[in-house]
Amino acid sequence: MPGDLSQSLRALLPEICLVALILVLLVLAMVRRAGNSRFLGWFTAVALTVVAAVAVLFSNPGSEIQTVWGGMLRFDAQGFLFRMLFLAGAALTALFTCTDDSIAPKQEFYLLLTVSTLGMSLMASASDLLMLFLAIETTSFPLYIMAGAKLKDERSTEAGIKYFLFGATNSALMLYGFSMLYGFSGTTRLYQVWDLSQKA
């Protein structure tokens, strides 16, 4: 049991680091003045790079393929690669936006970016329909707000509203599709659904 727990924690090391970063960003956003919030962009970019480095050093799955946390997540090289790509993309986004005067002063932007990255990371490793749905929603909700981050830009506001309406409709249809898959297969495990579809 201790070995299983340590393996599960090692598999989720990038996500654990992201949760810690989210808490740090939340505290920094509360204690720093809005005029200094450009610092959060640089801090987020560096922190995400550090998270990726820590993951490569201590959470690399190698050639092993394992399912952890009750089969909800798959720990393998392919998923790990996508998790690192998401971290790199988020770090570059934080780096580029901290020089944008219309975004940099918004302290919550980098917090939302990190929360969305957490959802993407979980999405890459999801091996269960429920986990996949939760990961997609964790990714999407911050993006709805980020799309409308430029309040003085009508196009940004319009994009935020349209993205929210599109995302809400998409989530409803996706959840309906997942319920149909569960009804046909009797399981929420993606690999079991795939195996049953091959036998049909």
Image: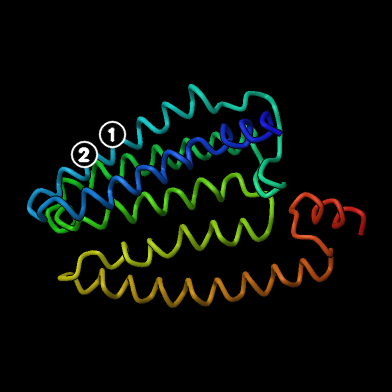
Residue type pointed to by label 2 = Trp
Residue name at image x 41 percent, y 26 percent: 53
Q: CA distance from mark 1 to mark 2?
A: 6 Å
Asked whether disc 1 touches disc 2, contact meaning CB atoms under 8 Å apart, the reply is yes
Query: Is disc 1 surrounded by few (<14), some (14 to 19) or many (20+) residues within 10 Å?
Result: some
Callout 1: SS = helix
Query: Is disc 2 surrounded by few (<14), some (14 to 19) or many (20+) residues within 10 Å?
Result: some
Quadrant of the frame with the N terminus: top right
Up the image or down, 139 lies above or below 69; here it is below
Residue 24: x, y in percent? 29, 45
Up the image or down, 185 lies above or below 59; here it is below
Q: Is residue 41 left or right of residue 53?
A: left
Residue name at image x 46 percent, y 38 percent: 85
Which mark is on residue 153? none
Q: Which residue is mark 2?
A: 42
Quadrant of the frame with the C terminus: bottom right
Up the image or down, 95 lies above or below 54; here it is below
Residue name at image x 28 percent, y 41 percent: 44
Residue 121: x, y in percent? 51, 45
Q: Is residue 116 left or right of residue 8?
A: left
Residue farthest along the right direction in this orientation: 199
Numbered disc total: 2
Residue name at image x 7 percent, y 53 percent: 35
Question: Is 186 in front, or is 160?
Answer: 186
Q: Is residue 38 left or right of residue 193?
A: left
Residue 81: x, y in percent? 54, 34
Residue farthest along the left direction in this orientation: 35
Callout 2: SS = helix
Residue 172 image-quadrant placement: bottom right
Residue type pointed to by label 1 = Val
Which mark is on residue 46? 1
Residue 127: x, y in percent? 68, 49
